[in-house]
Image (spheres, rainbow, N blue to C red):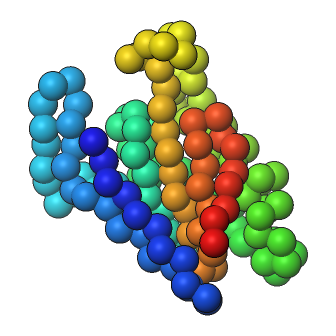
Amino acid sequence: MTTIIGVQYEDSCIIASDSRVAEGGKVYTHPEMVKAVERGSYIIGGAGDYRALQVVLHGWQPPIVTAKAKTNLYEFVINKVAPSLKTTLSEAGIEFTKSSDNSDDKFELSLIIGINGVLFEIDSDFAVAMSD
């Protein structure tokens, strides 16, 4: 089980995560196997399908945060960030509908993304949420 925490401050945010990976009944720990990264204006952390998380953390090129995007980051994440994530994962061969909702083989990915100090949560269905 992954632990990932996002803390929203008045004008900044922090994301922290554990550093262990459990996959296929094995547990891995290595400094290169991170679950949170900083990339330009973004900090990104996540849990769930580890291959999908690897693609997001190490292969995804987040959209550039323009001056217009800064005026409404929520809409920017809905209209630019989430679709960009989905496209990158699809191009990497990640299957979003692996099995039925009741199966252990169900696609699961939960991301916490900080952009310019504001936290957003993106779930497996690419819905975007915020919390005070």
| Vertical side of 85 occupied by 69: above or below | below
Residue furthest out toward the bottom: 11
Residue at x 53%, y 21% (from the top left corner): 95
Residue 8 or residue 98, whichever sits in front? 8
The quadrant of the picture occupied by the C terminus is bottom right
Residue 34, image x, y percentages? 29, 56
Looking at the picture, tell me which residue is in the foreground, 4 or 33.
4
Residue at 40% across, 34% down = 49
Whether residue 72 sits left or right of residue 122 in the image: it is right
Name the quadrant of the N terminus: top left
The image quarter containing residue 80 is: bottom right
Residue 47 seen anywhere in this rendered image of the structure: yes
Residue 117 location (% of width, % of height): 59, 80
Residue shown at the point (57%, 36%) measured from the top left = 124
Residue 99, image x, y percentages: 51, 11
Specify the quadrant of the image occupied by residue 8: bottom right
* Residue at image location 55% in from the left, 62% down from the top: 113
Q: Is residue 102 above or below residue 62?
A: above
Does residue 34 appear to the left or right of 107 in the view shown? left
Q: Height in image: 80 above or below 103?
A: below
Q: Depth check: 121 or 55 in front? A: 121
Q: Is residue 81 visible?
A: no
Left or right of 119 on screen, residue 34: left
Percent position (x, y) of residue 54? 39, 44
What is the tally of numbered marks visible in this picture? 0
